[in-house]
Image (cartoon, rainbow, N blue to C red):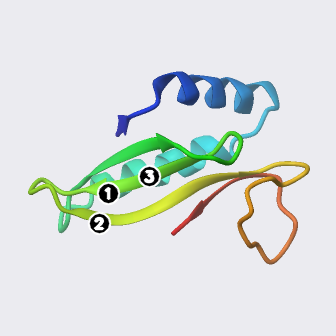
Amino acid sequence: MRIMCQEHYDKVVQYAESIGDKTLEECLQRLERREQNPRCPCQIELYRDFAPYSFLFKERYPDGRVGIVGGLVYHGCPDLSHCFIDESFHGWMTHT
């Protein structure tokens, strides 16, 4: 995984740890597993998103093409992500 916003990343990881939330770690692990897909390996690039404690991610293939683009979105209280979810949720979710 290539972190394109190290300062933001460190702040978000620290925040997740401070509130005892494991959903960020679980989402990051799922993204790392996507990189290891033997049929379609890629590198995940993580960028700062406009929503608090959230990220934008891109799959980048070895030939430079971009695959799935999505968000690793923090649904806080209040939820400032502007993303639709069916039920109230507190923590991080992957959106594509």
Q: Nearer the viewer, residue 25 or 70?
A: 70
Please tell me whether mark 1 sits on a helix, a strand or a loop: strand
Q: Which residue is mark 3?
A: 57
Please tell me whether mark 3 sits on a helix, a strand or a loop: strand
Q: Which residue is mark 1?
A: 59
Sequence order check, earlier mark of 1 and 2: 1
Amino acid type, residue under disc 1 in the picture? Glu
Evaluate if marks 1 and 2 touch, with contact meaning CB atoms under 8 Å apart: yes
Query: In the figure, residue 39 lies in which quadrant?
Result: bottom left
On the rendered image, what quadrant is the N terminus found in? Answer: top left
CA gap between label 3 and label 1 equals: 7 Å
Residue 3 at x, y percent in the picture:
40, 34
Sequence order check, earlier mark of 3 and 2: 3
Q: Which residue is mark 2?
A: 67
Evaluate if marks 3 and 1 touch, with contact meaning CB atoms under 8 Å apart: yes
Q: Residue at x 34, y 49 (%)?
A: 44
Please tell me whether mark 2 sits on a helix, a strand or a loop: strand
Residue 78 at x, y percent in the picture:
90, 51
